[in-house]
């Protein structure tokens, strides 16, 4: 029995995905030959967003608009993409699809969809990146937008399709958490491509093991021999060649400033699941999202509680993304490494 079950206070939502937060959908698209992909989070209505970015290799788009003092208060989509800086083009494909539907910031007769984006580096993973003059990412962004739903694939999917993390095949992870007594829902979505380690060296237990619910990432527990392990960076490479990009979301009503605090607290979950995190080799990003459906009773205490649960959710989602990933050429999955049923792609 896991910690949350024993307390009897929280449980995953219906899908155990970020889309259990009311008002959100997720779409994924990838290209097998390219060995890269795109994930997009889309709201059914309003979506308030802020961001917390750390590390030495962040790649981003529209982050300035997410500052609390910025004029724009609502965001139309968030894009997570592979492809390093080239992947930022995926937001253009999403913008085009939104504009066709008349969705965006209205400035007189003009409509400008607001689509922040963050990217990870997967250019050296063995895929064919010789795409010539036409980037594949706008089309992947549009395809991800068009496939958005409340249920979606984890592991080798979307922005996590070509990711590698902590010595294993990386991937796309997501979880949710329903607070007790009809309280808000919290969810996390993450593409894991970290330089740091994710598991204890002897048992293979994820560092996030103590947040796990219902053996969602294998139920492996650490052993005594895991104690005192040295700092490990199994995927040590050049600056900017890694990165974990994530979204935490809730249906609680939050301002942009509160979304920022929500994201800051959630970032602690990233540090618990990946050791070390926020290195010069990473460009770690956490977006904080509110769909603004459930007012807080106590704005300070309730925000602190939401942030603590967001940290738990992000730690779980990171482990789940790596656990669900399948082996690719040059990259062996966690499950194949530790003798779970063989899974290859």
Image: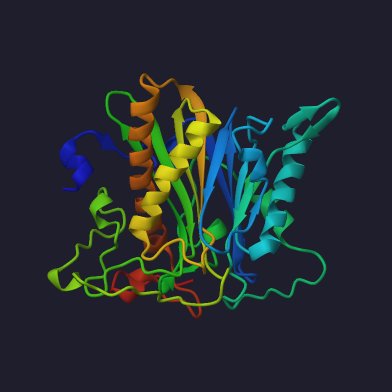
Measured along the vertical axis of the image, is residue 107 above or below residue 31?
above
Q: Tell me the quarter of the picture where residue 129 sits.
A: bottom right
Q: Is residue 243 visible?
A: yes
For the point 38% across and 66% down, the residue is: 276
For the point 20% across and 71% down, the residue is: 228
For the point 75% across and 71% down, the residue is: 131
Q: Tell me the quarter of the picture where residue 132 sits.
A: bottom right
Residue toward you, 7 or 19:
7
Measured along the vertical axis of the image, is residue 282 above or below residue 22?
below
Measured along the vertical axis of the image, is residue 17 above or below residue 23?
below
Percent position (x, y) of residue 127? 62, 75
In the picture, measured across the screen, residue 291 lies left or right of residue 311, that is right
Residue that protrudes farthest toward the front in the picture: 69
Q: Is residue 19 visible?
A: no
Percent position (x, y) of residue 321? 42, 58
Residue toward you, 9 or 69:
69
Measured along the vertical axis of the image, is residue 53 above or below residue 5?
below
Residue toward you, 178 or 279:
279
Residue that protrudes farthest toward the bottom in the picture: 330
In the picture, measured across the screen, residue 205 lies left or right of residue 298, that is left
Percent position (x, y) of residue 108? 84, 25
Residue toward you, 186 or 20:
186
Percent position (x, y) of residue 119? 60, 58
Residue that protrudes farthest toward the right in the picture: 109
């Amino acid at each position: 029995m896991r910690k949350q079950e024993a307390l009897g206070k929280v449980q995953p939502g219906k899908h155990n995905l970020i889309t259990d937060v009311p008002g959100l959908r997720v779409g994924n698209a990838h290209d097998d030959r390219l060995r890269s992909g795109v994930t997009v989070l889309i709201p059914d209505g309003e979506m308030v967003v802020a961001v917390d970015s750390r590390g030495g290799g962040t790649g981003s788009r529209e982050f300035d608009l997410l500052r609390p003092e910025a004029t724009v208060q609502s965001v139309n989509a968030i894009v997570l993409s592979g492809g390093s800086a080239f992947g930022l083009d995926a937001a253009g494909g999403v913008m085009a699809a939104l504009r066709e539907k008349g969705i965006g910031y209205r400035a007189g007769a003009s409509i400008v969809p607001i689509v922040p984006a963050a990217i990870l580096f997967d250019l050296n993973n063995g895929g064919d990146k010789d795409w010539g003059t036409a980037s594949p990412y706008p089309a992947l962004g549009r395809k991800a937008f068009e496939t958005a739903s409340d249920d979606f694939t984890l592991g080798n999917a979307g922005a996590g399709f070509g990711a590698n993390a902590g010595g294993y095949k990386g991937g796309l992870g997501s979880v949710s958490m329903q607070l007790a007594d009809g309280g808000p829902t919290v969810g996390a979505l993450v593409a894991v491509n970290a330089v740091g380690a994710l598991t204890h060296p002897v048992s293979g237990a994820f560092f996030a093991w103590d947040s796990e619910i219902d053996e969602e990432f294998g139920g492996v527990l650490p052993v005594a021999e895991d104690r005192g392990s040295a700092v490990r960076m199994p995927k040590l490479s050049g600056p900017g060649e890694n990165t974990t990009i994530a979204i935490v979301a809730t249906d609680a009503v939050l301002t942009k400033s509160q979304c920022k605090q929500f994201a800051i607290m959630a970032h602690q979950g990233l540090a618990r699941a990946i050791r070390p995190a926020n290195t010069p080799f990473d460009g770690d990003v956490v977006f904080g999202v509110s769909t603004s459906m459930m007012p807080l009773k106590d704005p300070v205490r309730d925000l602190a509680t939401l942030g603590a649960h967001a940290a738990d959710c992000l730690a779980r989602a990171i482990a789940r993304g790596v656990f669900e990933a399948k082996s690719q050429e040059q990259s062996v999955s966690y499950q194949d490494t530790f003798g779970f049923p063989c899974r290859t792609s």
